[in-house]
Amino acid sequence: MTPVAETEEHKALRSAVSALGKRYGRGYLATVVAEGRHPTELWAEAAKLGYLGVNLPEEYGGGGGGIAELSIVLEELGAAGCPLLMLVVSPAICGTVIARFGTAEQKRQWLPGLADGTRTMAFGITEPDAGSNSHRITTTARRDGTDWVLSGRKVFISGVDIADATLIVGRAEDARTGKLKPCLFVVPRETPGFERRPIDMELSSAEKQFELTLDEVRLPADALVGDEDAGLLQLFAGLNPERVMTAAFAIGMGRYAISRAVEYARDRTVWKQPIGAHQAIAHPLAQAHIDLELARLMMQKAAFLYDSGDDIAAGEAANMAKYAAGEACVRAVDQAVHTLGGNGLTREFGLASLITAARVSRIAPVSREMVLNYVSHQSLGLPKSY
Ligand SMILES: Cc1cc2nc3c(=O)[nH]c(=O)nc-3n(C[C@H](O)[C@H](O)[C@H](O)COP(=O)(O)OP(=O)(O)OC[C@H]3O[C@@H](n4cnc5c(N)ncnc54)[C@H](O)[C@@H]3O)c2cc1C
């Protein structure tokens, strides 16, 4: 049964992470972004407290929990105004894929560092000419003796500059059918031929996005994660946690925005009562709060299904959770900015930059329309237009 109420352990984790987040808060993140740094202090402290690797196996230094716990960590840091985007890729996608499918050596090499936060891994699937159509990716991997040689391009890949390696989704030729099948490769940051160029994003974020070129990148045989013939299964094992974590990111941001708006609406008085007494201000905030709570329920369902090993059911729920959270976040931020009137657009109140940030959860890692397509085809059985 999917639990609808949180366990005592989850409540305790939520309140402990929330306390950490509040000690850093929005001011800390704003300073880090303004100085062009990374939130290394918060990352290190969250790591020391065991939060970054809470989903990874205990035998490799993790907390032995699942995506349910990791999503609580990200949501609460976000609700305090200081989310760590790399949680979505490093422990959630890369950590999960390696823990579930990596060889014993890959687990030994990567999991302890991903769990204690001393190592980070980025994730690269998006390509300029494929976008939402990941069947169209052309980054290819060919064998050369025991080595692999990768060539291709990627775009919008987050955190490649701070990550020790990037988990790259490529395609290798199937010896039997000659068709190209997806395969995952660990590409260390400084590998010759692996070039990155920062993209000039209109985003106020510590983590940067990069365009990558893989020009005959030579990798040893053990750069291939897991089984060459089970790449698709392995990929989906990483993409569901990514959707759940993006939902957590969105819900945290939405909650942060609403909390700032409520604080403001309680005080700001331009007639007889504070503006929060006007239903035109109060009701949209109440609606946004309800939408965020509903999105969280779906996120918890998706995390529960995933952690119980039901990858198929988790797929539908994770897509729906990402959709619901992204939409709730965009609406919450919009209403929060509006509540502050002109102050909603000042740097001092710091909400306007969330307008762009909130849109990320509508676009990535899978756009609103692609989730609606998924539900139309997979859940409702409607025909495809593409
Ligand atoms: C801040 C940020 C960080 C990111 N980080 C990463 C990362 O770390 N790793 C990574 O691999 N990727 C990353 N991405 C990429 C992200 O996953 C893609 O932007 C996303 O998958 C959409 O692809 P696209 O941008 O090519 O849009 P496109 O696929 O070109 O889509 C453009 C528009 O067309 C719509 N559309 C496309 N096809 C259809 C259809 N069949 N029916 C209806 N509408 C359709 C889309 O919904 C969208 O609105 C990041 C993106 C951003 C913005």
Image: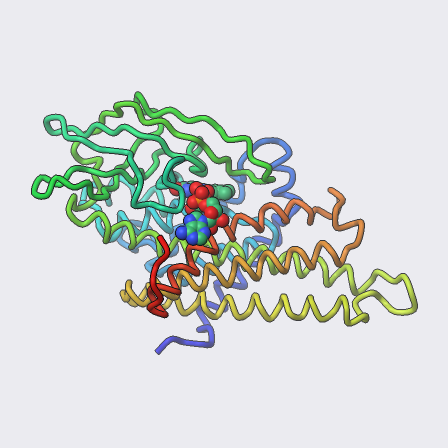
Determine the residue positioned at 50% across, 47% down.
84
Residue sitting nearer the eye, 84 or 63: 84
Instruction: Mark yes or no: residue 145 visible.
Output: yes
Q: Quadrant of residue 202?
A: top right
Q: Position of residue 297 (x, y in %)?
A: 48, 70
Q: Position of residue 239 (x, y in %)?
A: 35, 52
Q: Quadrant of ligand 1?
A: top left
Colouring method of the image = rainbow
Determine the residue positioned at 28% across, 66% down.
310
Instruction: Mark yes or no: residue 364 visible.
Output: no
- Determine whether, in the image, residue 206 is placed left or right of residue 284: left
Residue sitting nearer the eye, 63 or 221: 221
As drawn, the residue found furthest toward the left would be 176
- Determine whether, in the image, residue 65 is placed left or right of residue 289: left
Is the N terminus in the top left, top right, bottom left or bottom right quadrant? bottom left
- Determine whether, in the image, residue 14 is placed left or right of residue 68: right
Q: Position of residue 285 (x, y in %)?
A: 69, 66
As drawn, the residue found furthest toward the bottom would be 1
- Determine whether, in the image, residue 182 is placed left or right of residue 165: left
Determine the residue positioned at 63% across, 66% down.
288
Q: Position of residue 61 (x, y in %)?
A: 32, 50
The total of numbered circles placed on residues is 0
Residue sitting nearer the eye, 142 or 234: 142
Determine the residue positioned at 38% across, 36% down.
129
Up-down relation of residue 42 to residue 75 (above or below)? above
As drawn, the residue found furthest toward the top would be 192
